[in-house]
Amino acid sequence: MKRMGMIFRAKANKALDKAEDPGETLDYSYTKQLELLQKVRRGVADVATSRKRLELQLNGLRKDSAKLEEQGRKALSLGREDLAREALSRRAALQQQVGDLETQHETLQGEEEKLTLAAQRLQAKVDAFRTKKETIKATYTAAQAQTRIGEAFSGISEEMGDVGLAIQRAEDKTAQLQARAGALDELLASGALDDPSGLAKDDLQAELDRLSGGSDVELELQRMKAELAGGGSGQQAIESGSGSAEQQGQQAPQRDPRFDKQ
């Protein structure tokens, strides 16, 4: 089970790595940092609101304390010491509350300063990350385009690979057909295969045809010389040329009737 789990995690990690887009990952990280920065700012605003509320309470308590002190003075001036004592007692209770609120106010003010500084630092980091993110995305896009161009030029890309395979298959089929055609010609020429059309000739007949063609040329040449030289001498030249051609060919074909008419 542990091995199966490890294999599954390895394959899942490989699939995720293949499907991961660095640009999308960087954009997602930037979005999360903006959300964190927004939370810190809301925290600063909440602390500032609490501090302001304490300041309002402190101002109210200080006014009430000053009012009670004035009432105590007035009661004492009127000879009402009991009222003056009551006013001073209430004032002492208010002063206790004022002291507690001032302590809380100082604490909130310190927290507000810390959060404000943290928000400023986080804002600087987010701005730096945004610049770096755009730089990395641009570099990745350029490298990706350069890689695709290189693969296209080298023929190792998927599209160009298919084209190269098609060309290779066409060349192999052409070479195979050419080799087969050459082999059939050799077999027909050697007589190993019968030619149903009767157009193919064996090597002996081909040699005889060649010699016969040469004899016809010689005879035609002698005839033309005879025509130019005159009748009688031309006829002797034709006969002598015919005899020499027969000696060379040994088995020359029959004489063309055209020459007999001459």
Image (tube, grey):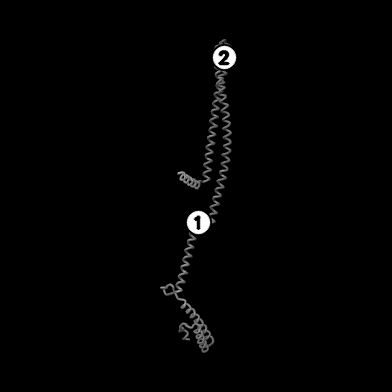
Q: Nearer the viewer, residue 191 or 185?
A: 191
| Mark with earlier residue (2, 1) | 2
Q: Nearer the viewer, residue 243 or 56?
A: 243
- Read off the residue under disc 2: 72
Question: Residue at coordinates 48% horizontally, 83% vertically from top-left?
Answer: 250
Please say if 106 is above or below 17: above
Task: Tally the numbered discs.
Answer: 2
Query: In screen coordinates, is 200 left or right of 126?
Result: left
Residue 188's image quarter?
bottom left
Disc 2 is placed on an element classified as: helix
What label sits on residue 161 in the rendered view?
A: 1
List x then y, in percent, for residue 232.
Answer: 51, 89
Give the spatial CA distance, label 2 vs label 1.
101 Å
Q: Amino acid at mark 2?
A: Gly
Front of the two marks 2 and 1: 1
List x then y, in percent, for residue 80.
Answer: 56, 11
Q: Amino acid at mark 1?
A: Gly
Q: Residues within 10 Å of mark 1 (few under 14, many from 20)?
A: some
Looking at the image, the residue that sits furthest to the top is 79
Query: In screen coordinates, is 188 left or right of 77?
Result: left
List x then y, in percent, for residue 21.
Answer: 51, 46
Q: Nearer the viewer, residue 11 or 240?
A: 11
List x then y, in percent, for residue 22.
Answer: 53, 45
